[in-house]
Amino acid sequence: MFEAVESYRPHVIAALGDAGAQGLTVKELRARLEAGEGVIRRTLTLLLCTGVVREAFRYTPGARGAAPRAYTLAHADDTAPVVSSATALGQAVTE
């Protein structure tokens, strides 16, 4: 499992970098990377825990239902704490 997450991590980061400020949802990432939902969600969880990715809600006026979560790359000037050790990376995946 850890190997799958590690192999998709650079692809998810590249896709989010190409997406710009609006970001991508899990469904859009699945379509771009042609990967399963589980590995995309686990990779995003790891990237969220390490502070590489931010989560926001994409509100569309007039749309019904819940606003989908969009993921974007975090900027260097963000004030949230960032976990940056290899040990924390391993703990984030195994916990």
Image: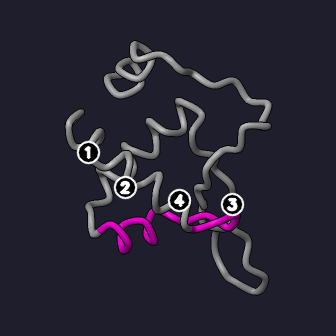
Q: Secondary structure at mark 3?
A: strand
Amino acid of disc 2:
His
Q: Are marks 2 and 3 in contact (CB under 8 Å)?
A: no
Q: Are marks 2 and 1 in contact (CB under 8 Å)?
A: yes
Q: CA distance from mark 3 to mark 1?
A: 27 Å
Distance between the alpha carbons at the discs numbered 2 and 4: 9 Å
Residue at (36%, 74%) from the top-left corner?
31
Q: Residue at x 64, y 66 (%)?
A: 20
Residue bounds of the magenta highlight:
19-33
- Mark sitting earlier along the chain (4/1): 1
Residue 7 in the image: state x and y as whole percent. Answer: 26, 45
The residue most toward the top is 87
Label 3–label 1 contact, CB within 8 A: no
Across and down, in percent, residue 33 comes to: 33, 66
Q: In this orientation, which residue lies closer to the viewer: 32 or 95?
A: 32
Query: Distance of mark 2 from mark 3, alpha carbons?
Result: 22 Å
Is 13 left or right of 31, judged from the image as shown?
right
Circle 4 sits on which residue?
16
Q: Are marks 4 and 1 in contact (CB under 8 Å)?
A: no
Q: Which residue is mark 3?
A: 57
Residue that mark 2 sits on:
11
| Residue 21 magenta | yes
